[in-house]
Amino acid sequence: MTETINVQAATRAFLARTEEHLVSYLEACVHCGLCADACHFHEASGDPRHTPAYKLFPMAKAYRGQKFPYNLIAPKITEKDLKEWEELLFDTCTMCGRCTTVCPMGIDIASIVGQARQAFVAAGLGPEDLMQAAQNSKDHGSALNVTPERFADRLEWLEDENEVPIPVDKPKADILLTISSIETMKYPDSIVAMAKILNHAGVSWTTSTKGYEATNFGYLAGRGDIAKIMVNRIVEAAEACGAKTVVIPECGHAYGVLRWGAANMIGRALPFEVLHISEFMAKLKREGKLKLTPVKESITYHDPCQISRRGGATEDARYLLDGFAEDFREMTPTGNLNWCCGGGGGVQAIGRTAELRHKVFKIKIDQVEKTGASTLVSSCSNCRLTMDESKEALHWGGGLGSLVELIADHLVENESVVAAAE
Ligand code: SF4
Ligand code: SF4
């Protein structure tokens, strides 16, 4: 692929995506700079290039330069531009949406970054490790090469080791549980925890070797074709077993893509409801199907951006913790304004971002230490991985954990201990 073709392909892809709402965003920025302090990357680095509004420039430049071809003073997109922008769009935006909460014009920079990433991919650009993760998802079933056979073997091993039934490929089930490959390879206790909770609630459920991978690296890498394949695998697996509900595990973008983006990707309504595991556990609690012993230790909660701010499930985690975590302490800011972990949007998969991610984690350390809580719990395995790596790199002594594992560790069959359900 020649340099010229790369630039032309990128420009065409940019222009193909300058849909009405994106154009209005590009035109609406009043350059007030309010978004700068809302972005964790700018907060951590102090680099003015990490200002959210700066990330609009690739599309704005392509739009202004190419939509008006007779405007001879309009700037043209160049190969040099593309290389500089790759770092801005992939390495320094987690598509967390925090900047939009302060923007007086309501500009959704996260969605513009998502579109711009697709343009890069169309030009054959983009971080190699993120592109490989997407390709692995298409070719082998998951970013971490968890093939269907490996997935089934892993679940069988977890079932035997933990003496917890984990159904695979049941012909009929009300609920299809999907899993993140980060959990399969790094946090298998999360899978066991979800199985314990589903079994405890007495619901009809299964996993499927046809559609098991929740994390959609096609979306994160700007590969719309792979994103659609990943979504279709889950849809077809759910249809095959007649599932009315698809449960997304502790993964933020997996939830955002399937809950809010999938129907548009496949061109039809999803034939099931989509619930994140924290929403599903909250539902079980409301229905009186979740009985828990209380947690005594001090706990704070990290809101994954795609589940809380951009997902709408902020209150379900609090509902779960209410009356269960006896010493729960909120961070400031929290909920829909919580600081991102720094590794969402595929940034975690880009190796060269590690140092910047560690700087971002210092914001989180400061937040947690102000609460005095001994453990920071999250409900996203990608956040958890990001924070675990930074914790190690920075030699931080605070505790990190998972909401689903915390709940599973405190399940009881004896309602007289503590009835968490209302
Ligand atoms: S979406 Fe998040 S990471 Fe991206 S520019 Fe806005 S605040 Fe920064
Ligand atoms: S806050 Fe909104 S209007 Fe102001 S500079 Fe940022 S993107 Fe532009």
Image (cartoon, rainbow, N blue to C red):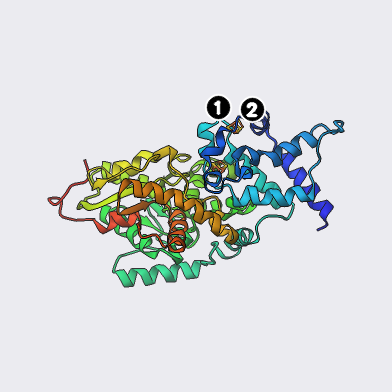
The quadrant in which residue 320 appears is: top left
Q: Indicate the quadrant containing the C terminus: top left, top right, bottom left or bottom right.
A: top left
How much space separates mark 1 and mark 2, taking CA atoms? 9 Å
The answer to whether residue 147 is above or below residue 251 is: below
Secondary-structure class at tag 1: loop
Reading the image, the residue beneath label 1 is 104
Res 244 seen here: no
Secondary-structure class at tag 2: loop
Q: Residue at x 34, y 62 (%)?
A: 192
- Percent coordinates x, y for residue 179 in the rendering: 44, 58
- Percent coordinates x, y for residue 185 in the rendering: 45, 66
Q: Is mark 2 within 8 Å of ligand 2?
A: yes
Question: What's under tag 1, amino acid-wise?
Answer: Pro
Q: Which of the two discs, 1 and 2, labels the residue nearer the N terminus?
A: 2
Question: What's under tag 2, amino acid-wise?
Answer: Val
Q: Residue at x 50, y 45 (%)?
A: 256
The answer to whether residue 121 is above or below residue 98 is: below
Q: Indicate the quadrant containing the N terminus: top left, top right, bottom left or bottom right.
A: bottom right
Reading the image, the residue beneath label 2 is 30
